Image: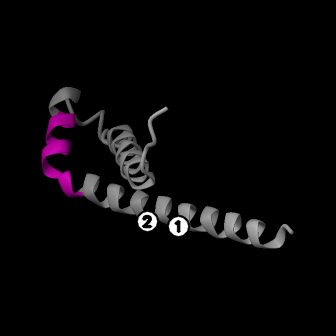
Amino acid sequence: MMKIRVWKVWLLSSLIMAIAVYFSTSIDPLDLDKSNDVQLHDTYFVIQNWSFLLIWTLLFLIINGIIALIYKLIRYFIACSTP
């Protein structure tokens, strides 16, 4: 079995979560009745708010980093406490 580095999984999972949240929130439900073309609305949102994806990616990088740190600390304390 191939050994996968933790930082690669961390980056990949953060990016996947950020993209999922980005595209699931790209359509404003309150704005659909005003917009005639939903596809045009999506394209406009993605082009105009590309920084939104960057913000989500950074947020998930921080969250995943904190979770990984807590996991490592718990494993360390469990390993130290067992005789």
From the image, which quarter does the C terminus lie in?
A: bottom right
Residue in view at x 75 percent, y 66 percent: 79
Q: Which residues are magenta?
A: 41-51
Q: Mainly helix, strand or loop, the magenta region?
A: helix
Residue in view at x 70 percent, y 66 percent: 74
Task: Please rate how many residues cluster around mark 2, counting C-alpha atoms within 10 Å: few if below 14, some from 14 to 19, many from 20.
Answer: some
Provide residue 14's location: percent of width, then percent of height.
Answer: 40, 51
User: Does 75 appear above or below 27?
Assistant: below
Describe the element under mark 2 as helix, strand or loop: helix
Q: Nearer the viewer, residue 15 or 52?
A: 15
Question: Which quadrant of the view contains residue 57?
Answer: bottom left
The residue under label 2 is 62
Provide residue 41's location: percent of width, then percent of height.
Answer: 19, 36
User: Does 78 appear above or below 41?
Assistant: below
Q: Nearer the viewer, residue 72 or 70?
A: 72
| Tag 1–tag 2 contact (CB < 8 Å) | yes
Residue in view at x 14 percent, y 31 percent: 40
Question: Which quadrant of the view contains residue 22?
Answer: top left
Q: In screen coordinates, is 41 left or right of 7?
A: left
Task: Please rate how many residues cluster around mark 1, counting C-alpha atoms within 10 Å: few if below 14, some from 14 to 19, many from 20.
Answer: few
- Is 49 part of what is drawn in magenta? yes
- Give amino acid for label 1: Ile
Provide residue 58's location: percent of width, then percent of height.
Answer: 34, 62
Colour convention of the picture = one colour
- Is 50 part of what is drawn in magenta? yes
Q: In screen coordinates, is 1 left or right of 75?
A: left
The residue under label 1 is 66
